[in-house]
Image: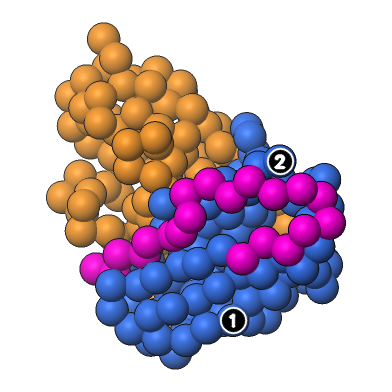
Chain colours: A orange, B blue
Amino acid sequence: QVQLQQSGPGLVKPSQTLSLTCSISGDSVSSNIASWNWIRQSPSRGLEWLGRTYYRSRWYNDYAPSVKSRITINPDTSKNQFSLQLNSVTPEDTAVYYCGRVYNSNPRGVFDIWGQGTVVTVSS
Amino acid sequence: EIVLTQSPATLSLSPGERATLSCGASHSVSNNYLGWYQQKSGLAPRLLIYDSSTRATGIPDRFSGSGSGTDFTLTISRLEPEDFAVYYCQQYGNSPLTFGGGTKVEI
């Protein structure tokens, strides 16, 4: 079955870059009928979609307006994984970060598979 | 962006009772592209419903979704002990994807 396994540090200093990776098993990051997303959850902001990467004859990325100036999501086909980088973090970026799959030729959809979540704290 | 407002914030019920959860959208959700999730403490959300009323794979038929436009409902016909959790709606008809604030179903 499809599984997503997240990795990355749980503590990031203010102004630095948050970096997480999501490794895919049972599916392909290059699938033409899936998109690969990052979502976060905090008490103050609730569940918040951050962005996605997907392949439809070429690679596409879409980002939420709230983080668009600071975020990069990259696929890594050699390792069948995708990554999140969020620059210039502040304590407001403290949250549980999830990766998730949308299984649909339309990259917008519901998340049927989720990673286990990574608690990321932004603090000096 | 579309803002989703869930009500009530908390629903206090007993096993065997019927739960009715509401999700209101600030603008009409295109194609009624709305989903529902269940989340238990410390775990990722679990997909229950998509396209407003279609149950996801393996979801029991006591869970049902309905609604269109700006008003959507998740109904749990008879609460089982494992159904006590937080429920979220999510719209995907308009960019960016957005989630509601959640309804906690408690005993």
Residues at discs 2 and 1 in contact (Cβ within 8 Å): no
Which chain contains the residue that carries disc 2? B
Which residue appears at 52% of the width and 57% of the height?
Answer: B88
Q: x%, y% of residue A79?
A: 58, 48
Residue receiving disc 2: B107
Q: Nearer the viewer, residue A8 or A102?
A: A102
Q: Amino acid at mark 1?
A: Ser
Which residue appears at 33% of the width and 83% of the height?
Answer: B28
Q: Amino acid at mark 2?
A: Ile
Q: Nearer the viewer, residue B89 or B43?
A: B89
Q: Is residue B68 left or right of residue A63?
A: right
Indicate the quadrant containing the C terminus of chain B: top left, top right, bottom left or bottom right: top right
Residue A44 in which image quadrant? top left
The answer to if A22 sits in the magenta stretch is: no
**In terms of secondary structure, where does tag 2 sit?**
loop
- Number of labels in the image equals 2
Give the spatial CA distance, label 2 vs label 1: 24 Å
Q: Which residues are magenta?
A: B1-20
Residue receiving disc 1: B66
Q: x%, y% of residue A119?
A: 48, 27
Is disc 2 surrounded by few (<14), some (14 to 19) or many (20+) residues within 10 Å?
few
